[in-house]
Image (cartoon, rainbow, N blue to C red):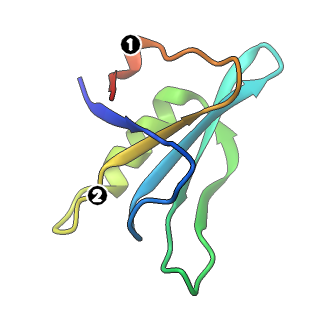
Amino acid sequence: MHTYHRYHGTDPAPGALIIKLYHSGDQIRGFIRKVAEPSEDDMIFPGEEMEPEAAFRMAENKSRGPEQHPIYVELAEGLEWNPAWGTLI
């Protein structure tokens, strides 16, 4: 199981990934954004919504390497964390 950090509204250090999960109809979807330097715009990828498991898998793949950053999760209002996704601290 992977451990993720709850996003509290203030951007973490540049390079960190934030998974935003939200309701889309009766399903949960998400997208990933990479926090940029203050003088640049954040990168959002991919441009389409995806299932939570795919978002977590993509974020894990993108966070590998010499400069690993924690992965943050932002839950839309009314959305509950599913423990099957991992641990949210």
Picture quadrant of residue 15? bottom left
Residue, x 41% and y 71% (percent of image)? 14
Secondary structure under tag 1 reads: helix
* The one of 41 and 52 positioned closer to us in this rendering: 41
* The one of 8 and 87 positioned closer to us in this rendering: 8
Secondary structure under tag 2 reads: loop
In this picture, residue 74 sits left or right of residue 83: right
In this picture, residue 41 sits left or right of residue 63: right
**Residue 82, position in %: x, y?**
47, 13
**Residue 33, position in %: x, y?**
56, 57
Residue, x 20% and y 63% (percent of image)? 65
Residue 47, label in figure: none
Hey, which residue is sitting farthest bottom in the picture? 39
Q: Is residue 14 above or below residue 25?
A: below
Residue marked by disc 1? 84
Residue marked by disc 2? 69
Q: CA distance from mark 1 to mark 2?
A: 22 Å
Residue type at tag 2:
His
**Residue 75, position in %: x, y?**
59, 30
